[in-house]
Amino acid sequence: MKTDEMISKLNSDYFDMELAYLYGGSRLSYQKKRYEAAVNRFCELFPCDDDIRLFSAPGRTELGGNHTDHQCGCALAAAVSLDMAAVVSFNDSGKIRLYSEGFGMSEVDVCKTDPDPDEYGTTAALIRGINAGMRERGINTCGFDAYTVSDVPGGSGLSSSAAFETLIGTIISLSAGSPLSPAVIAKIGQYAENRYFGKSCGLLDQAVCASGGLVFLDFRDSAAPVIQSFDFDFEKAGYCVCITDTKGSHSDLTEDYTAVPGEMRLVAEYFGKSVLREVDRQDFLNALPSLHGKMSDRAILRAAHFFDENQRAVLQAQALQDNDVERFIALYKSSARSSSELLQNLYSSAHPDRQGITLGIMLSRMILGEDCPVRVHGGGFAGTVQAIVPTDKAELYAEKMDEFFGSGSCSAVRIRPTGGAELRRSEG
């Protein structure tokens, strides 16, 4: 529809049911204003009288399986209500012009699909890679203009990059009139990030952002992971998931991140395997005396974390399927301790003076009680903490965390039931 009509619809109840489905009823007014502002900004950047469409893709939060996916393990994660939104106008230009708020303008020729080394690490690289992945699957991609804005904080562990990849994949897929499955969109996003953006990553983030909802993932076959979606409502159970950005920088943590899978693989190689998922847990336990002295203590500890954490992710998913929130929280606390004591990813050993995550965990316990469920979120070493907070304490918790880390640092996230989507008229 035309821009004036779109703004009029946003100010009516036209999109209300869809917005409430994606974001929750309490966020309706905010989201209407957010999308209206995005439409107005699009018109400033791309003055035209063409029809526009609205798209969205969620960030994700990890609930179980910390650093298990790169060892072909299991994980539990969920799409969240913090998302990336886009205003899009399709055309026959053969070019994708996209302005990403905070990152500027990118332009990609849809016919030029080879990776460009000069683009590594840029928005254009991801767009080019996703476009190429689509065309390799026979999708006749076309040109479009787009403006994107994000509520997913960069570097927060909520996977802003996977949200962006899912968003672009959804836009291109739906524009072609033959929507691709979430699994295919996720694989195309991973392909773009690996080959075009220049970053090695697994499929977990993309799979969750594309699928939506609460998702259990088994990466035993990394080329075709098992993705199982199921329902659980934390709010109905009396809890909310809170994420706090501790403002830590990831800029110099590459060695910390690469050391985790590297050390785990060293232990796997001792048994003649490539990843720990291929090693029997009892064989590992029996070999502990022999392992000691042949490799670092930290490598042994991180391998021990994997074996327990991999099984724990399965048990956490089962607890939520059984609607047993108390069992889930007990397992969640065990996972938090394992990440702290065995995986050791609360802070960088090269920068012991920077311990924002450890501070966040300490503050959470001061606010909610010593036994509260709180943990490092995502890859760790810097970034965010996650807490499962009783709903009647969520406002106080956010207020106190914001006092320490800055206004807006703490967000209560809602599980979003769907992945990449186009905002359409409410029905019913």
Image: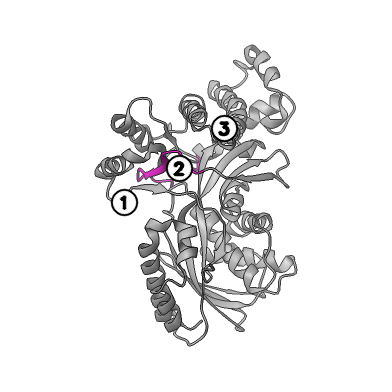
Image spot of residue 29 (x, y percent): 36, 64
Q: Nearer the viewer, residue 207 or 31?
A: 31
Check disc 1: other Cα within 10 Å, few if <14, some if 14-19, many if 20+: few
Asked if residue 76 shows in the view, the reply is yes
Work out whether 341 lies above or below 398. Answer: above
**Most foreground residue, 161 or 415:** 415
The spot of residue 81 in percent (x, y) is 46, 54
Q: Nearer the viewer, mark 1 or mark 2?
A: 2
Q: Would you name the residue on which mark 3 appears? A: 319
Under tag 3, what secondary structure? helix
Q: Earlier in the sequence, mark 1 or mark 2?
A: 2
- Measured as percent of width and height from the top left, residue 85 is found at 47, 65
Residue that appears at 38% across and 25% down: 371
Instruction: Please give the residue where the numbered disc 1 appears in the rendered image.
Output: 408
**In this rendering, is residue 130 above or below 146?**
above
Q: How many C-alpha atoms fall within 10 Å of the one at disc 2: few (<14), some, or many (≥20)? A: few
The residue sitting at 56% across, 63% down in the picture is: 421
Q: Residues within 10 Å of mark 3 (few under 14, many from 20)?
A: some
**Point 71% across, 33% down: residue:** 274
Residue 180 percent across, percent down from the top left: 68, 63
Q: Does residue 125 appear in this view?
A: no
Residue that carries the numbered disc 2 in the rendered image: 236
Q: Is residue 251 magenta?
A: yes
> Disc 2 residue type?
Lys
**Mark pair 2, 3: CA separation:** 15 Å
In magenta, the rendered stretch is 233-255
Residue positioned most to the top? 289
Front position in the image: 108 or 182: 182
Q: Earlier in the sequence, mark 2 or mark 3?
A: 2
Quarter where residue 152 is shown: bottom left
Label 2 element class: loop
Q: Amino acid at mark 3?
A: Ala
